[in-house]
Amino acid sequence: MPIVQHTIESTTQANGSTNNVLRMYDQDGTEYTQVFNAPAGFNVQTKIDNTIVNTNEQLAEAEYQALLGL
Amino acid sequence: MATYFVASGGSNTAPYDTWAKAATSLQTALTAASTDGDVVAIQYDGVPSVNAEQTVDTTYTFAANISLISSTNSGTSTITPTQMGTSYWIGNSTANRLVNMAGAFRVFCYGITLRVSGSTGDSLVLAVTDGAHFVYEDCYLWNNNTSVSSPAISVGNTDAQVFVHAKNCTFHLNQAAARIAVASKLLIEGGSLATTGTIPTGGLFVAATNDPAGAQVDCYGFDLSYLGSNAIVGNATTNAFPVRLTQCKLGTAYTAMATQTHLNRSSAELFIFDCASDDTHGLFGYHNAMGSVVSNTGIKYTGGAAAQSWGVTTTANCSFATPFTTPWVNLYHSGTSAITPWFEVLRDGSATAYTNAQVWGEFGAKVTTGSTAATLYHDRQALVDWAAGTAGASQASGTDTWDGENATHWAGKVDSGSAMTPAEAGDIRGRVVVGAPSITVYVDPYIRT
């Protein structure tokens, strides 16, 4: 069940860093949430892309294990 | 108390009581050290080849409550504690040879380096026996194995009840799937994740995969910054796995937890006390499968106690029946008058009040004279109304003195629901409970009375 959509909410912190809430949705509409802080100037989009890749890998692994009854 | 020496240049002469007569195998000395309080001293730069380049998987079995000290060879019978560092080790530098530390005893290890290598999956197990208590101080714990099958530095590798204390130790991993696998209790104080090698990406700490016996991790002063933005805690599929970090250094834009298979509190949870990736102090975090609390200095109650709010974000797994609950906040209280304590809360981006079916407060106080037992109070919607499908009632308005919020917002408060009268001096405790999925609530983490 790959991630097909996501949203990001960011709030800027006192020191210029950001607090981010990433909500990812798979093709069934199931939501997966990650919350992370990022320093000022950090490439948040790269972090989002990596998080989605990692989540896809985890979901594929979980699906594989479920199919095998592990 | 006897001392037994181990050195590659020893004569291997019992009772191994001088460097000259040192055993030429670590296990020989460990077997001889069979009385509580015995010490085994191993030459830091003279590890016998049978131990430094093991030809087979090896379990080092301790026979009593003893100490294993890495030492300089003085030539006499004195011990000068000296770390092996990355130049010398017990294990193997190229091949995959498992290293197990065994024995159901209280064992203290100073300065040793334990090293596992190779490319076929193998582990370094810091305590393998049920009932083992191993303390490692200034040690280098090195699993350089590059197998994709999750090489691990393990704390118990079966259903083992063990305790490992790593004090000022370096943990060195070298594979994206590598991890510190915990089957029981791990305490890390000081030390770091080595800043070399392939960075683990699936979660540094994981509960061991073979149904551990209450896996948990406490870290104080541990530097995990080499993890970068990768997950601190992996997917916990075998244990309700708590990890607590206090005054640790985290990676930039770290991920608290990998996505959890079990979408509830039977999975992992992570507490973060006063940790950050940089020079930002006093931040707090708490994460589980139902949601998270993260310090927020951008939106905060004006003049709030710590110039920060708690940003509470819930996941899709959260509901009225199985809500996300923040950690408790304590307030010392010695008065005995009736009070109705409350938290100030904020909804940002919407002026619609949260209801008592979405967000509520829970408080506890000692209201019975002569008893320490707390009584709980809350302002949650009544169960009978919830069960009947009745919409919740709007929570009361708050003081509305916040900084950093949108022009469109709702400022409210959640309280104890009814007055309570503390009868004994002590802490009042309060927390905010969020029973709606996928929402954000800002909380001033201070109990007002």
Image (cartoon, helix red, strand yellow):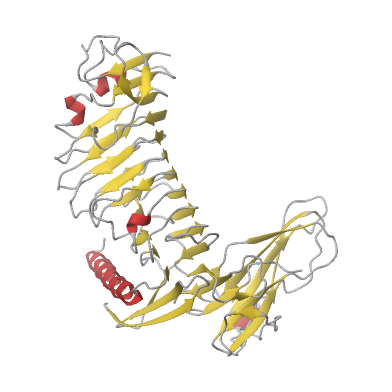
Indicate left or right for B25 with B69 as reference. Answer: left
Q: Quadrant of residue A60?
A: bottom left
Q: Is residue B187 above or below residue B319?
A: above
Query: Looking at the picture, how far across and down is residue B401, in whole percent?
Result: 67, 80
B271 vs B362: above or below: above
Give B41 or B1, whichever is nearer the viewer.
B41
Q: Is residue B129 left or right of residue B272?
A: left
For the C terminus of chain A, which image quadrant?
bottom left
Task: Give x and y (percent) for residue B142.
Answer: 27, 42
Q: Position of residue B115 (x, y in %)?
A: 24, 38
Q: Which of these two is toward me, B134 or B295?
A: B295
Decide: is B295 above or below B190: below
The quarter of the picture where residue B390 lies is bottom right
Q: Is residue B32 visible?
A: no
| Residue at the far right in the pictured view | B337
Q: Which quarter of the picture shows residue A27?
A: bottom left
User: Is residue B43 in view?
Assistant: yes
Residue beneath the point at 36% across and 44% down? B159
Q: Position of residue B385 (x, y in %)?
A: 64, 83
* Residue at x 56%, y 89% (from the top left corner): B350
Q: Quadrant of the N terminus of chain A?
A: bottom left
The structure residue drawn at horizontal position 33% and vertical position 16%, both measured from the top left corner, is: B4
Q: Is residue B376 left or right of residue B87?
A: right
For image coordinates 42% across by 44% down, the residue present is B186
Mark count: 0
